[in-house]
Amino acid sequence: MSATELRTVSIIGTGSYIPEKVVTNADLAKIVDTTDEWIVSRTGMKERHMARPDEAASDMGAAAARKALEAAGVTADQVGMIVCASITPDMPFPSTACYVQRLIGAHNAFCLDITAACSGFIYSLELARNAIACGQVDTALIIGTEKLTGVIDWQDRQTCVLFGDAAGAAVLSARGAPHGIRATSLGSDGRLAELLMLPGGGSRHPTSAETIAQRLHYMKMSGREVFKHAVTRMVEACQKALAKAGAKVEDVDLVIPHQANLRIIEAIGHRLGVATDKYFINLEKYGNISAASIPVALDEAVRGGRVKKGDTIVLVAFGGGFTWGSAVLDWDKE
Ligand code: ACO
């Protein structure tokens, strides 16, 4: 199929799910040596949410997916593909996407998980866009869902204050306006994998009493290093995606960045040249929710009236791998 025959693809519905339990900075100060002042000044975060012990990534993903389908006016049996992005899947296999399929009854879909950490939603968007553009499926459901409170080391103040649990979802379809998702730019650098990882429990370090004693089943992060790379790569990804879309920074109505740190977002804003009031920020309520970060923010922006028909939106993320990505889209829904 030549490029001219490719279909344009749009997001036609969004949804999110936030677990009820709130963990404040003051709560964390009772567990580790930290303060509300440190967390707010270094990250901008005030609260995060925590899933119930019986709630898995697929449960949260399914709750977000149901809302996205409802908003899109699409029934579960019309979904041809489910992509689930998560670093906290229900289990190594079957995929979390297959569990979501079962929970929502999307029995005509093929399902897969992807691991791209905090960039997972943008990677999913691109996979689903391609599948729809070339006619493999008509409608796709993409989900970012994370139960990070289950994989953070509650003795490590450098990481445990940063993360939370949530899920977000979007429905993609070919029945959209002329533009929809205009361009994406994705990248990875495995040479820096060790700076942000969860080393235990896979084939490199299968779970054993020793790996547990070494706390390898918890996330490890070299925060300062990650910070520097995040700023550089997110700015670069936005610039590349905007160039591919034929858009300028002046055309951008809203930037939805991965919500890892307010200072990262401010640094990107400064370098990219998009006015600060055009950045959607909700990290004070949820902390870093990895792959769920962008779809939750997008859903809040849509439902809160921050996004209007015709707006040009930039999504941008950076995460473990390293992975990064940006997408430029025109919002074509009322
Ligand atoms: N409370 C109090 N003090 C703390 C805490 C805490 N919770 N955590 C660290 N500190 C201390 C450190 O020990 C250090 O003390 P020292 O100077 O005596 O050694 C001091 O605070 C400064 O530590 P830094 O790590 O340099 O702090 P920084 O300003 O870099 O902020 C942070 C740390 C918030 C982690 C930041 O580096 C960051 O946001 N990094 C990027 C995170 C990110 O983008 N991740 C990507 C996505 S995540 C994913 O893919 C799953």
Image: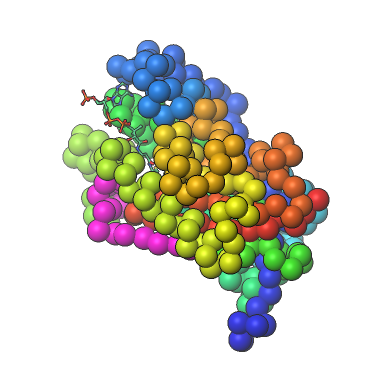
Q: Is residue 211 left or right of residue 109?
A: left
Q: Is residue 234 left or right of residue 22?
A: left
Q: Quadrant of ligand 1?
A: top left
**252 over 293 or under it: above or below:** below
Residue 315 image point, x, y percent: 55, 51
Is residue 62 among the parts visible in the rendering? no
Q: What is the magenta range?
A: 184-202
Q: Residue furthest bottom?
A: 1
Instruction: Name the residue at 51% across, 62% down.
Output: 241
Is residue 275 among the parts visible in the rendering? yes
Residue 334 image point, x, y percent: 81, 50
Asked if residue 131 is among those painted magenta in the image, a careful observer would answer no
Q: In the figure, residue 160 lies in which quadrant?
A: top left
Q: Quadrant of the N terminus?
A: bottom right
Q: In the figure, residue 192 lies in which quadrant?
A: bottom left
**179 over 171 or under it: above or below:** below
Residue 73 image point, x, y percent: 80, 54
Residue 108 image point, x, y percent: 68, 66
Instruction: Name the residue at 60% across, 52% down.
Output: 250
